């Protein structure tokens, strides 16, 4: 079964997914899913090998956008995702607070322009945070709070030496970890704190 499909294409699709465990099981599940798609599983229409691969690649990329911000334990294994045919589930609708999320992300120090498609994972995180904080901040105040804190962080970062800009985390990491709630002392370059914590964290990841 697996050898009826281009191995390079299977590996490329598999690479897109955020949680992988067993390559052999996942490649087999992927080949079986592609065969089902080719046989008309999606809408009753048969698809060529190229069309089936293109369809699956798009669905896996969408799944990655949605699932990547989650803790790993809440992300289904790729084989599970495929065997349960979750790729047939319609794409999730845009975030309810999309405009607010875009306006917040635009304030982040490393973001020069918001690309909705490319930034969708972080926009979904911001949407979730806005909805979660509405309980304590109320309505538009939740988005305003996150936006204000992001602007403040950007102001602090602008004072950093150029050599320290490498320690600015990706917006997805910063918002997912809710760093906008940090004490501002962690955003200020001082002799006392510097960026040793960030350096140590990066060093551990590289070991």
Image (spheres, rainbow, N blue to C red):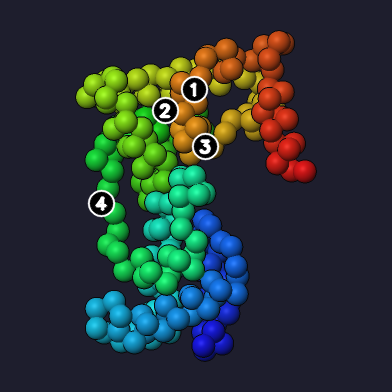
Residue sitting at 52 percent across and 14 percent down?
183
Q: CA distance from mark 1 to mark 2?
A: 7 Å
Which disc number belongs to residue 173?
A: 3
**Crowding at mark 3 (Cα within 10 Å: few <14, some 14-19, many 20+):** some
Which tag, 4 or 2, sits closer to the chain's start? 4
Find out whether the residues at labels 1 and 2 contact each other: C-beta distance under 8 Å. yes
- Between circles 3 and 2, the one closer to the viewer is 3
Alpha-carbon span between mark 1 and mark 3: 15 Å
Q: Say few, some or many: other residues with alpha carbon within 10 Å of mark 4 (under 14 / 14 to 19 / 20 or more).
A: few
Q: Nearer the viewer, residue 33 or 127?
A: 33
Q: Nearer the viewer, mark 1 or mark 3?
A: 3
Q: Residue at x 48, y 75 (%)?
A: 30
Name the residue beneath numbered marker 4. 93
State the image coordinates of residue 132 (x, y, percent, origin top left).
32, 31
Q: Which residue is mark 2?
A: 107
Question: Which residue is rendered at x = 36% and y = 80% of the image?
Answer: 37
Helix, strand or loop at label 1? It is: helix
> Which badge, 3 or 4, is on the more N-terminal residue?
4
CA distance separating discs 3 and 4:
23 Å
Identify residue for label 1: 154
Q: Earlier in the sequence, mark 1 or mark 3?
A: 1
Q: Which secondary structure, mark 3? A: helix
The residues bearing labels 3 and 2 have C-alpha atoms spaced at a distance of 15 Å
Q: Position of residue 89 (x, y in %)?
A: 30, 64
């Amino acid at each position: 079964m697996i050898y009826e499909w281009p191995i390079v294409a299977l590996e490329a699709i598999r690479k897109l997914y955020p949680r992988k465990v067993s390559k052999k099981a996942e490649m087999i599940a992927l080949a079986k899913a592609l065969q089902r798609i080719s046989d008309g599983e999606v809408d009753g229409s048969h698809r060529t090998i190229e069309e089936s691969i293109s369809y699956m690649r798009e669905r896996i990329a969408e799944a990655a956008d949605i699932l990547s911000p989650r803790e790993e334990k809440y992300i289904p294994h790729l084989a599970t995702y495929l065997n349960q045919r979750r790729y047939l589930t319609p794409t999730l609708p845009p975030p309810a607070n999309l405009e607010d999320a875009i306006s917040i992300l635009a304030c982040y120090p490393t973001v020069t322009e918001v690309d909705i498609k490319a930034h969708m994972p972080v926009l979904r995180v911001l949407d979730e945070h806005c909805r979660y904080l509405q309980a304590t901040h109320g309505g538009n105040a939740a988005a305003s709070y996150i936006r204000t804190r992001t602007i403040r962080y950007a102001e602090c970062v602008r004072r950093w030496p150029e050599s320290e800009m490498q320690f600015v985390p990706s917006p997805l990491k910063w918002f997912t970890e809710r760093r906008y709630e940090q004490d501002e002392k962690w955003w200020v370059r001082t002799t006392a704190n510097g960026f040793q914590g960030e350096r140590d964290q990066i060093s551990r990841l590289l070991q």
